[in-house]
Amino acid sequence: MKVTIVGAGNVGATCADVIAYRGIASEVVLLDIKEGFAEGKAMDISQCKTSTGWNTNVTGVTNDYSKTADSDVVVITSGIPRKPGMTREELIGINAGIVKSVADNVLKYSPNTIIVVVSNPMDTMTYLTLKATGLPKNRIIGMGGALDSSRFKYYLSKALDKPANDVSAMVIGGHGDTTMIPLTRLAAYNGIPVSEFLSQDALDKVAADTMVGGATLTGLLGTSAWYAPGASVAYLVDSILNDQKKMIACSVFLEGEYGQSDICIGVPCIIGKNGVEQILDIQLDDKEKGLFAKSADAVRNMNADLKSVLA
């Protein structure tokens, strides 16, 4: 099984490292436009083999999409972060052009691949990829919900003082500080609702901390996080390649689910060898429905800036 990761920056390289270390794929190709950058990252990762005992073939290439041929999954991390003085529309316009070009190029050599979108703004870039490629909606997946849910479980585990792996919780909605919706009502510790252990004030704080989880790390690190994002991508890729049918919150195209259509936004999905194998239309309460509708409006407003790219 072969995975291509376009963009060998911190997130892309971490994703490659986790996939290799865990033996998720037999081959990983890192591709970047910067001369020698992906090759260097691949070489560094590969030099861990004898110390850690894995055998995945990791290679790096500079802008040579022919080396990505026959990839089962392609991960797109390409794009630039928003810079001082740059408007949201400028960021979307630049990254949309990059993501569209990447998608077109990978499909020349891997027409049957499943594409995982990581580039920001993630929901909008997922929608762009779907519309620009014309691929079936099950083959275009935005990663954000997996990362947001991981952060939600982390903050819940800290509040509970219990292992994060014993916590079940999910974040839906847009992948943004003001658009994500941590579902505290449905969160559980070993099957028991967390509300049995935490007060409403504590749960509200966990939700608020989750929503600014990325910004918190950026403030501490001086740049965007990469360990958890890279691992979250690998987790999603694992469920695809090994047909694990895990329930993962992903940004996917909706056609009436949750009262929304013609939008990519985070909802719980079953992820397997065919990509999105099922969208789970879970019952939200009135408050959650209102938050989801508001989140969808915000994402749809950002999508409006794609008109020139999709024209």
Image (tube, rainbow, N blue to C red):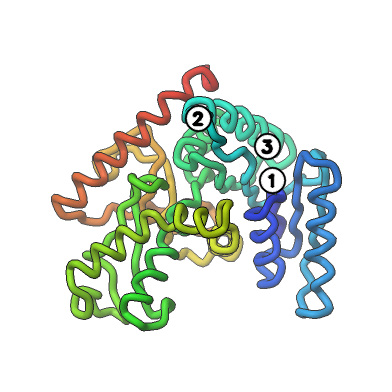
Q: Circle 3: is it few (<14), some (14-19), or many (20+) Cα within 10 Å? A: many
Classify mark 2: residues with Cα within 10 Å, few (<14), some (14-19) or many (20+). Answer: some
The amino acid sitting under disc 3 is: Leu
Asked if disc 3 and disc 2 are in contact, CB closer than 8 Å, the reply is no
In percent of width and height, residue 70 lies at 74, 48
The answer to which of 19 and 270 lies nearer the viewer is: 19
User: Which residue in the protein does label 1 denote?
Assistant: 6
Q: Residue 237 carries which label?
A: none
Q: What residue type is labelled 2?
A: Lys
Cα separation between marks 1 and 2 = 19 Å
Residue drawn 53% across the image and 29% down it: 86
Q: Is mark 3 on a helix, strand or loop?
A: helix
Circle 1/circle 3 CB separation < 8 Å: no
Q: Distance between the residues labelled 3 and 2?
A: 14 Å
Q: Mark 3 points at which residue?
A: 107
Q: Which of 223 and 162 is in front in this view?
A: 223
- Please name the residue that numbered disc 2 is placed on: 131
Looking at the rendered structure, the secondary structure element under dot 1 is: strand
Is 267 displayed left or right of 113 in the figure? left
Indicate which disc, 3 or 2, sits on the residue closer to the N terminus: 3
Q: In this view, does 7 lie above or below 302?
A: below
Question: Is the residue 198 above or below the residue 135 in the image?
Answer: below
Q: What element carries label 2?
A: helix
Tell me: residue 118, above or below residue 225.
Answer: above
Q: What residue type is labelled 1?
A: Val
Any part of residue 277 in sight: no
Q: How far apart are marks 1 and 3 (CA)?
A: 13 Å
Q: What residue appears at the point 41 percent right and 82 percent down from the top-left corner?
A: 163
